[in-house]
């Protein structure tokens, strides 16, 4: 049996500033290369969980293990795309992508070469010299995602990366994301409000209760990834969607 790449054990968070209990007693494990989605109502603590994993804030109790060792120092292990990623409007796509790389004391030319090769690999090189304002919403999200991927961390934390996009753009971005994942095979934790998106992309889905978030159900999808669009209209996907929606609608505060 393979050992988990990441284990979250009895994790809870109460913000000391305002006493809000973001989530309680979360426990789950993630295998290397697995794609795990987290679905739950607003304010059930999803972004807080990512902040804790990325080391932006501390948990109140519980532990996080990486390859079965307690990992108190986790900075640098997680690539984190925030819910509202910031692209600097005065920097081009290329300059935005290398943001952060330049902090790593890599030479400028090395940064540019690396960023260009990644942009090329994922079909964005032709946008390298454009400014964010001239990009569509979908393109902006792709650029922000590439910036996260560039650091080649073991784990990717993606917080509703396609949440603001229309359905068609979203589907195109999902196909594109699958293509990226096939090439780099990271372990992914993905927050979404969109049940179909979770079903399309994930190996495992955790459904969280309203605040304070607790795992109320785990779904495992055995269909191999990457998946084709037609999977979305298959019996398997439709049945899952109905099941997940009925759980979410049963919960209060939605
Ligand atoms: P979600 O991402 O599921 O919508 P969040 O993790 O953003 O939920 O927030 C969970 C709860 O914690 C909310 O009630 C929110 O107001 C609160 N919260 C989030 N960040 C902070 C913070 N930095 N300080 C205090 N409370 C916070
Ligand atoms: Mg959030």
Image (cartoon, helix red, strand yellow):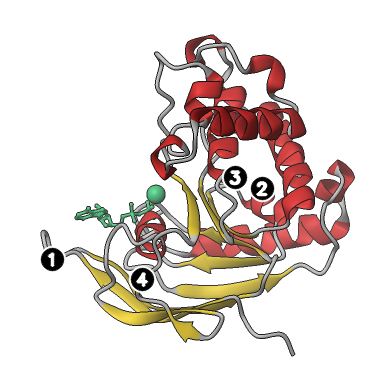
x%, y% of residue 37?
A: 59, 60
Quadrant in which the N terminus appears: bottom right
Q: Callout 1: few (<14), some (14-19), or many (20+) C-alpha neighbours within 10 Å? A: few
Do we see residue 196 in this rendering?
yes
Label 1 near label 2: C-beta < 8 Å? no
Comparing marks 3 and 1, which lies closer to the viewer? 3
Which sits earlier in the primary sequence, circle 2 or circle 4? Answer: 4
Q: Distance between the residues labelled 3 and 1?
A: 33 Å
Q: How far apart are marks 4 and 3 (CA)?
A: 21 Å
Q: In this view, does 209 lie above or below 167?
A: below
Q: Mark 2 points at which residue?
A: 197
Q: Does the residue labelled 4 lie within 8 Å of ligand 1?
A: no
Q: Does residue 105 appear left or right of residue 61 in this picture? A: right
Do we see residue 167 in this rendering?
no
Q: Is mark 1 on a helix, strand or loop?
A: loop
Q: What element carries label 2?
A: helix
Q: Does residue 195 appear left or right of residue 208 in this picture? A: right
Which sits earlier in the primary sequence, circle 3 or circle 2? Answer: 3
Which sits earlier in the primary sequence, circle 2 or circle 1? Answer: 1
* Corner quadrant of residue 63: bottom left
Which sits earlier in the primary sequence, circle 4 or circle 1? Answer: 1
Residue occupying image coordinates x 59% and y 42%: 150
x%, y% of residue 135?
A: 57, 15
Q: How far apart are marks 2 and 1 (CA)?
A: 34 Å
Label 1 near label 4: C-beta < 8 Å? no
Which sits earlier in the primary sequence, circle 3 or circle 1? Answer: 1
Q: In this view, does 249 lie above or below 81?
A: below
Q: Mark 4 points at which residue?
A: 73
Q: Callout 2: few (<14), some (14-19), or many (20+) C-alpha neighbours within 10 Å? A: some
- The label number, if any, that marks residue 16 in the structure image: 1
């Amino acid at each position: 049996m393979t050992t988990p790449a990441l284990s979250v054990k009895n994790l809870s968070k109460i913000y000391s500033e305002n006493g809000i209990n973001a989530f309680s007693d979360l426990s789950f494990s993630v295998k290397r290369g697995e794609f795990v989605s987290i679905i739950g109502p607003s304010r059930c603590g999803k972004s807080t969980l990512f902040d804790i994993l990325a080391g932006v804030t501390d948990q109140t109790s519980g532990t996080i293990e990486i390859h079965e060792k307690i990992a108190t120092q986790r900075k640098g292990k997680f690539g984190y795309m925030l819910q509202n990623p910031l692209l600097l409007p005065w920097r081009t796509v290329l300059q935005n992508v290398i943001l952060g790389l330049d902090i790593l004391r890599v030479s400028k030319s090395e940064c540019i070469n690396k960023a260009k090769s990644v942009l090329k690999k994922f079909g964005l090189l032709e946008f390298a010299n454009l400014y964010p304002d001239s990009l569509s919403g979908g393109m902006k999200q792709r650029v922000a995602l590439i910036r996260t991927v560039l650091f080649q961390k073991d784990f990717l934390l993606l917080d509703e990366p396609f949440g603001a996009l229309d359905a068609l753009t979203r589907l195109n971005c999902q196909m594109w994301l699958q293509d990226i994942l096939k090439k780099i095979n990271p372990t992914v934790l993905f927050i979404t409000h969109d049940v179909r998106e979770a079903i399309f992309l994930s190996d495992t889905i955790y459904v969280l209760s309203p605040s304070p978030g607790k795992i109320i159900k785990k779904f495992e999808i055995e269909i191999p990834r990457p998946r084709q669009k037609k999977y979305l209209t298959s019996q398997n996907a439709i049945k899952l969607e109905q099941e997940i929606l009925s759980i979410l609608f049963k919960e209060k505060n939605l």
